[in-house]
Amino acid sequence: MSEAEIKNLEDQFDAKIARDEKIEPKDWMPEKYRKTHIRQMSQHAHSEIVGMLPEGNWITRAPSLRRKVALLAKVQDEAGHGLYLYSACETLGITREQMYEDLHSGKAKYSSIFNYPTVTWADMGAIGWLVDGAAIINQVPLCNTSFGPYARAMVRVCKEESFHQRQGYEIMLSLCNGSAEQKNMAQDALNRWWWPSLMMLGPTDAESTHTDQSMKWKLKRKTNDELRQQFIDQTVPQADILGLTIPDADLKWNEETGHYDFGEINWDEFWQVVKGHGPMNKSRIDARRNAWEGGAWVREAATAYADKQRARKEETAQAS
Amino acid sequence: MKKETPLWEVFIRSKNGLEHRHCGSLHAEDAEMAMNNARDVYTRRNEGVSIWVVESTNITASSPESSGELFEPANDKVYRHPTFYELPDELKHM
Ligand SMILES: [Fe+2]
Ligand SMILES: [Fe+2]
């Protein structure tokens, strides 16, 4: 294809998206669109899967059966989200095995938030409330993104997220209505998860490289800073109901802008964690790699069993 | 061992009276495993009363390049639509 022809196809493609038409896997698409989507969707899938680890840590130690079944169901949902997204991503021609390999080798990233440890039960509350809360803000606009399989997966995911956030907030609420020690535990969890949750919404607009292109392809509807502001504005009143203090001395309602002003985010910490130097990076990747390698014999057995069944079927078909 | 686990497409009937609809895909070695996985991945909240799983290699799909020859012939057949026929306004129940 000549350059002019490609340019023409790209113009038609952009116009299609601008008209709110969806792109489906077999449609022509610019190579950059395919690559960007594989990167973002696989990164999103990895985040769901790695995201099971911090919470999985507390399932056996949940304080009651009610909390245990809820947490178990939530973590199972996250596995489901990962699977919806992996299979949506595979429609672009990358294999599941390749995606796992990229995660395990460190080539593919996942959300920085999951590289923090979950040290008390209150962290289950803070994660559901803040981390799933921030994830919802990120994900809702993606229900209208231009790539059909991604948009459809996000619709399913968003339907399930609201339970996640509510179960987290309910944990916080119980702790805050409990003993002084329990309330302290809730405050401590908020102190540790607040800033990483703000960072989770991505680098500031000035630092963010792909925003223009992502806006055009509807991978983004609002900038990182807009999403962050939205998150802060909706979360501060929720902290007030709990009677907890947001760990930011500069946080103040701004009558003029109609938003909360907030303090400086420690972006050095963010980039450290992204580059692999967060408290749990190594442990998370080790856990994923061990699960994959330790599970190899199960996959091999399943293959062997399926082959055997197939052979047996063919044998009986020939005999009859 | 570098073999990839086969891909299956999952279709779900959300309730009787409605058709099965494609809802996504998954990997499984055989139909039974595909069915079990489909139950866990796609129907955790009563989303369905019936599941079909089809190994993806068994699906023949039309390609977007041939959509012209496949679908354009219908474009100029306006007489297949009720609005093509000009009838008086007084005419009722038709
Ligand atoms: Fe999720
Ligand atoms: Fe979630």
Image (cartoon, coloured by chain):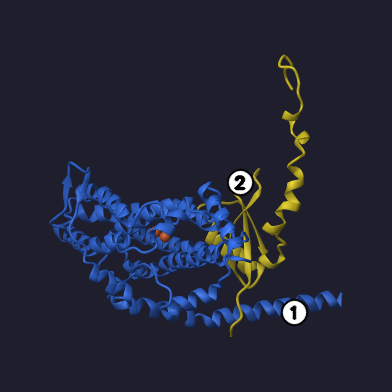
Chain colours: A blue, B yellow
Q: Residue furthest bottom?
A: B1
Chain letter of the residue carrying label 1: A
> Does residue B88 lie above or below A139 as drawn?
above
> Does residue A105 lie above or below A83 as drawn?
below
Q: Which amino acid, mark 2?
A: Lys
Quadrant of the snapshot with the C terminus of chain A: bottom right
Chain letter of the residue carrying label 2: B
In the structure shown, which secondary structural element does the residue marked by tag 2 occupy?
loop
Classify the position of ligand 2 by quadrant: top left, top right, bottom left or bottom right.
bottom left
Which residue is found at the position 58% from the left and 51% from the top? B48
Q: Which amino acid, mark 1?
A: Ala
**A284 on left or right of B59:** left
Residue A119 in sight: no
In the rendered image, residue B67, in percent from the top left (x then y), is placed at 71, 53
Q: Residues within 10 Å of mark 2 (few under 14, many from 20)?
A: few
Q: Which residue is mark 1?
A: A311
Give the number of the disc on residue B15. Answer: 2
Looking at the picture, tell me which residue is in the foreground, A183 or A159: A159
